[in-house]
Amino acid sequence: MEISLTDEDLRFEEEVQRAPHSVSSWQRYLAHKRKHAGFDVRAVYMVYERALQRVPGSYKLWKQYLDLRVSKVHVLNPALHADEYAKTTLCFERALLHQRRMPRLWLDYCGHAVRQADVSRARRVFDRALRALPVTQHVRIWPVYERFALGVGGATCRRVYARLLRVWPERAAEYAAACELRGDWAEAARVLVDEIDARRSDEADAWRRLAHVLREQPDALGGRTERVVRDGIRRQAAAASAGAGAGGLWTVLAMYHAAGGREEQARAVFEQALGGVRGMRDFAQVFDAYAAWSEALVAGALARMVDAPGGGGGQALVDLRLHRLDRLLDRRAELASAVEVRVAPTSVDAWLRRTALFAGRGDAAAERRAFEQAVAHVTHAHAAPEGAKRLWLAYAGSCATPAEARGVLERAAHALPATADAAGDVFAWWAERELGAWGGGSAEQARRVLAQAVRRVPGDRRLWSQLVDLEEAAGNVAATRAAYEQMLVQRVASAQTVVDYAMFLEDRGLHEDAFRVYERGVAALGFPVAVDLWGVYLRRFLKRYGGARVERARGLFEQAVAGCPAEHARPLYVAYAAFEAEHGSARRALAACARLARLAGPPADTRLESWRFYAAKTAELVGLPATRAVYEEAVGQLPDAQALLIAVDFAQAERRMGEVDRARALFAYAAQLATDDASAAVWPAWHAFEVQHGSEDSFKEMLRVKRLVRARYAADATVLAAADMRAKEKTAAINTKKKAAADADNAPAVAHAPANPDEVAIDDDF
């Protein structure tokens, strides 16, 4: 080709002649040739060819040259301009002789080959690229190759993806989705089955997708369909998800047989599915498909009967299919209940709903079978005794005769653990029925049941109480006493039980036996329950003997207070003092009051009330002047808050005795114990006292003392607040220092990006 040079070209020609191997010189020359609009592309091609003859290893020149040729040729129709495409192809081949490791050139070459609509040539170019490039660069070729294969489809697509999946098996799901979009159901099913067998992805999702494929094309797997689907059902049933997703597979299998005209096999699969699914979602899916298929069968039979009215057996077939459809719809609630108890076989509520379903239909046999299955599952699975009790009682209540119910209750009594309250509830329910309709008003059978109950569940107080009530109502004193005695021996008797037993004996004149029962109850129950029991015992004893047996009564009181904790002893000491005041001596009564007041265990407020009781009893029995010693001792022993209150009581006592000066001194002493929040107890009383008995000077003195107390309290509060503020500031400063130190330790170091030792610089010169 003749070279046409202009005056501007001469300068660049001289430069490339001086440095023919300089890429930058050729780049400047090419930029000069291309900068003018409407440049001669053939002249530029010639310059590129000359440059590449001199520097054939320059990637930059090859890339620019090929991009230029591709941009010019790709606007042409490859069928009409095959020669131009062939020239560009030859340029790519020449470039790859020198740059065979450059993935960008291979990608451009692949794109160029794809545009020529020659599938075989394009596939060979892709294959050469994969062979020429290292494995680490294949990730750049495969996406383009994959798009090409999907566009071509057919055998080419399958072969390309077969190679792709050997490299990246996790792409199988994408390939299956692509096959579904193209309608290649057989290939999609094959890929999904291989994916499931390899267990490379979410198995449940793969089965769902396979079910979708088989719904669209039931024979996509050919003769393997039933074997594969049943394997999926078995896997899903054994999975941790408890069979989630198996409903779709059951439906697919049934419709596979239906599509093949195997009606009875399809129906058998549907029935097997309804008896095997383990979830309401799967059940609804299978049932709806079954019902829709049954309706389609009815519609088909009707259509055939209309088309051939004279055909024999048409009406019979319609009637048969309608009957099957009606029966299926009627069984929905029963089938759903069966699924519910399969999912939760120990759920008492689910079993009760199932039995109620049969009871509502009046099917006693089915109800009994359901109860038997329920108690077998619930009892053998060691379910909660309370739930098992509900089930057994419902079973007994559903029995037609008392004899059947007794048999059920006998089984329940042995099935439930004897340590649980549920067993006692069963016996109690049984006894109530025997007393009611079952026994015809006779208590004999109920007594036998309760006797058996207390042997089986000896720790149930309610059963013992019912047995005692029955024996007492029957007038059987010996049996009643025996039952009460067993309650005491089994340690199930409460305080009320002890009182009832004692009252039972007292009503029959057995007072000493009743007192012994009280003593046994006190010993068995202990404190604090024994406090109330002692109170009843002592009241009954005093009612019986009054002041006739003072020493014995005194001994009982001493026994009661000796073992009682201090915090619970007040009622006993008060009763002791009242007894001594009425039947003993004032000295002993006051001694009991003093012992109560000096107890150290009770709270301060309780001790205050005890001292007040002591003072009141002293004033009542000995006289008001004798209370001075009591008040003085109380002021010395009580805390300040309670000492202030008792001092005010002391002052009021002195006022009643006419000792005004002593009363004023006591008010002044109490004021020294007062704080601002406790001053309400002393100031009103002192104010009323001064108004009634004081003078102007004494009233002013009271006001002065009141101001001093309030000022002292305010000063103390200020000091405490300041100390608290200083402590908070110190704590905050320490926390700030700790946080600053922690932030300094956790501060990230300045990171410098490391140099890339594998970086390759493509410069202009080679």
Image (spheres, rainbow, N blue to C red):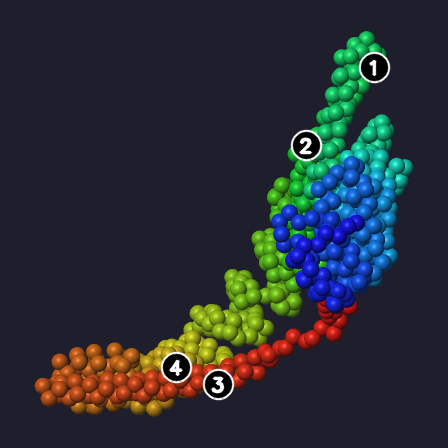
Residue 565 visible in the picture: yes
Earlier sequence position, callout 1 versus callout 4: 1
Instruction: For marks 3 and 2, give the one nearer the viewer.
Output: 3
Instruction: For marks 1 and 4, give the one nearer the viewer.
Output: 1
Q: Are marks 1 and 4 in contact (CB under 8 Å)?
A: no
Q: Which mark is residue 313?
A: 1
Task: Characterize the local packing of mark 4: few (<14), some (14-19) or many (20 or more) Cα atoms within 10 angstroms.
Answer: some
Q: Position of residue 205 (x, y in %)?
A: 74, 48
Earlier sequence position, callout 4 versus callout 3: 4
Which residue type carries mark 3? Lys
Earlier sequence position, callout 4 versus callout 2: 2
Q: Position of residue 538 (x, y in %)?
A: 47, 73
Earlier sequence position, callout 1 versus callout 2: 1
Instruction: For marks 4 and 3, give the one nearer the viewer.
Output: 3
Task: Characterize the local packing of mark 3: few (<14), some (14-19) or many (20 or more) Cα atoms within 10 angstroms.
Answer: few
Closer-to-camera residue (355/277): 277
Going by the image, does 416 lie left or right of 694?
right
Label 2 sits on a secondary structure element that is: helix
Answer above or below: position of 750 versus 314: below
Q: Which residue is mark 2?
A: 361
Label 1 sits on a secondary structure element that is: loop
Q: Which mark is residue 489?
A: none
Mark 4 → mark 2, Cα distance in angstroms: 70 Å
Q: Which mark is residue 737?
A: 3
Earlier sequence position, callout 3 versus callout 2: 2
Instruction: For marks 1 and 2, give the one nearer the viewer.
Output: 1
Closer-to-camera residue (573/312): 312
Q: Which residue is mark 4?
A: 604
